[in-house]
Structure formats: C-alpha cells, structure tokens
Image (cartoon, rainbow, N blue to C red):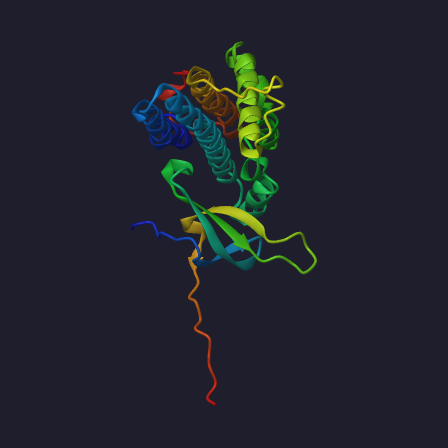
C-alpha cells in the first residue's frame, strides 16, 4: 500500500478530474460554440488539477508530520506539529515547485533532489508543474500576458492532459521519496513497502 | 472502540506542552494519518497584537470535546 495521501490522489481526486474530462466530451453545439465552451472547460480543468495536486501535496505533508511526531515524547508532539504547519505554503498558495520544496524541506529532506534522483525526467516534470501553475494564475487573474504574450490564450485539452500526466508520474515519486526519507529517519517503514514503484 | 468524529465548528481541547488549550475544528482532513487515522485542523486563540490565530493538525485521540455553554440570560 502506498501512503494514504496517494490512495486519495489515485481515488477520489482522480475521479473528480475524470469528471471534468467527461464534461468535455459531453459538450455539444456548433463548431465555434463548442470551441468556446470547451475552452472554458479547459480553463476549469487547469484550476481543478492545480487544486487537487495541492491537496495531495498538503495531505502527504500532513501524513509525514504525523509519522515524525509519533516517535517523540507525547509532551513535545504539540510543539512539533505546530512548527511544521506554521506558515505552510501549501495551506495558502499554489503548489508551485518552490512551495512544495520549502514545505517538505522543513521536515529535513532535500525534497526535489530526492525526487529528481528517482527519475531524471522529473526535472522536466517539475517545469511542467510550474507551467501549469503559471496558466492557473493567468486564468484566475485573467492576465494571460505571462503565458500567451501573443495575446491568444488558447489552451488545448492535450496540453492539460500532458500536465496531468506529468503530475500522475510525480505523485508516486513524491510518495517514494518521502518513504525513503522516513524509513531512514524513523528506522522503520512509514507505510507498506509493497508499492514503492512510480506506477 | 470507534474513533470519535468531529465536525467543523466543534469546540475541542488539546495538550500543548504542559497546558490545555481550547480550539475550534476548522477542517476534517480525512484518514491521512498514521495507519489511516483521521486528522483535524484546529484553530486556537492568539494573543492580542499577534498575527492571528494559530493552527495545528491533530488526530482524534489527542482531542477532547468541549461542551458549548449556553449563554445565561438574566431576568428582566
């Protein structure tokens, strides 16, 4: 079994993202009308993808904290819990690579180094994550200059699917990196080692 | 014994060092803790002139429910 956070990512979070894929298929109308409608769905898809990935990262961060504090004396646990979630980037803003790195690094791991060490292609996936967040911000603020300087903010479904595919690969790597780190730190497996692969 | 469940807005008490602190459940974070135990995000009071309330995530076993006391209305 992977982490509880990853189970949620591959379960209810994936289901929610699939629903918006289905909505895309369901849109009818004339060619031009459909193009406009699906564009708005693609924009929504970006927001939902970002928000569910943020949820996964925040869940995994909380899950790791729960494992770490379990090995300290009870009277110290509250302080540790408080410090680890204090000013947590993932509780306030987007899951951009810097926010993820700074939150997990506070647990004592060199997060992105470990994640990229698992698969060299994760460096490119990290860039795709940043690209997704740039688009998410452009959509949320209706300011497309940073992502479409030519002034045509067209977002195709294939591109959103590409970002989702990158995150679908990154999520198990996050899980795996924290498994390795906690196994060393805690001198025992935090969750079952039955599924450490990136699949 | 079934794990106690809390809802958003419930008043709870927890240990922070050697003192007891009262707070309010802000979010049920779901069964993401060790061995699938449920975690709760709890907000608790801040000192005057501080930057606002603090938040902590705790499992149900480290929380105690606090009864809401109905306001006492005087006669007349």
- For the C terminus of chain A, the quadrant is top left
Res A16 → quadrant: top left
Q: Residue at x 45, y 20 (%)?
A: A160
Please name whichever residue, A75 or B69, is drawn nearer the observer in this view of the structure.
B69
User: In the figure, A85 relative to A36: above or below?
Assistant: below
Residue A141 position within the rendered picture, expressed as x and y whole percent measured from the top left: 58, 34
Is A9 left or right of A89, judged from the image as shown? Answer: left
Rendered-image quadrant of the N terminus of chain A: top left
Where does residue A30 sit, x and y in percent of width and height? 34, 22
- Outermost residue to the right: B49
Residue B22 in picture, x, y percent from top left: 52, 60
Residue at 46% from the left image edge and 53% from the top image edge: B25
> Is residue B6 left or right of A177 when viewed as pictured?
left
**x then y, percent, for residue A138:** 57, 28
Q: Residue furthest bottom?
A: B76
Q: Is residue A63 above or below residue A171?
A: below
Tally the marks. 0
Q: Is residue B60 left or right of residue A103?
A: left
User: Could you say which is closer to the camera, residue A79 or residue A126?
Assistant: A126
């Amino acid at each position: 079994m992977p982490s509880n956070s990853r189970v949620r990512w591959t379960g209810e979070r994936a289901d929610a993202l699939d629903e918006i894929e289905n909505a895309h298929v369901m849109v009818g109308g004339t060619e031009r009308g459909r193009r406009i409608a699906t564009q708005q769905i693609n924009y929504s898809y970006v927001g939902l993808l970002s928000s569910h990935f943020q949820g996964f990262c925040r869940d995994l961060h909380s899950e790791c904290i729960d494992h770490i504090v379990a090995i300290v004396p009870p009277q110290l646990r509250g302080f540790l819990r408080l410090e680890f979630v204090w000013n947590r980037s993932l509780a306030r803003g987007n899951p951009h690579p810097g926010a993820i790195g700074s939150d997990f690094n506070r647990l004592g791991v060199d997060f992105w180094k470990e994640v990229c060490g698992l698969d060299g292609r994760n460096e490119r996936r990290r860039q795709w994550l940043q690209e997704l967040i740039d688009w998410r911000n452009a959509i949320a603020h209706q300011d497309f200059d940073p992502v479409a300087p030519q002034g045509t903010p067209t977002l195709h479904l294939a591109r959103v699917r590409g970002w989702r595919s990158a995150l679908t690969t990154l999520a198990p790597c996050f899980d795996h990196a924290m498994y390795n780190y906690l196994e060393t730190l805690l001198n025992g497996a935090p969750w079952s080692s039955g599924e450490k692969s990136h699949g | 014994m079934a794990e106690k469940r809390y809802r958003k807005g419930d008043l709870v008490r927890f240990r922070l060092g050697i003192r007891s602190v009262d707070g309010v459940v802000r979010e049920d974070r779901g069964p993401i803790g060790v061995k699938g135990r449920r975690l709760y995000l709890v907000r608790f009071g801040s000192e005057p002139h501080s930057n606002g309330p603090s938040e902590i995530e705790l499992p149900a076993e480290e929380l105690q429910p606090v009864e809401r006391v109905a306001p006492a209305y005087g006669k007349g």
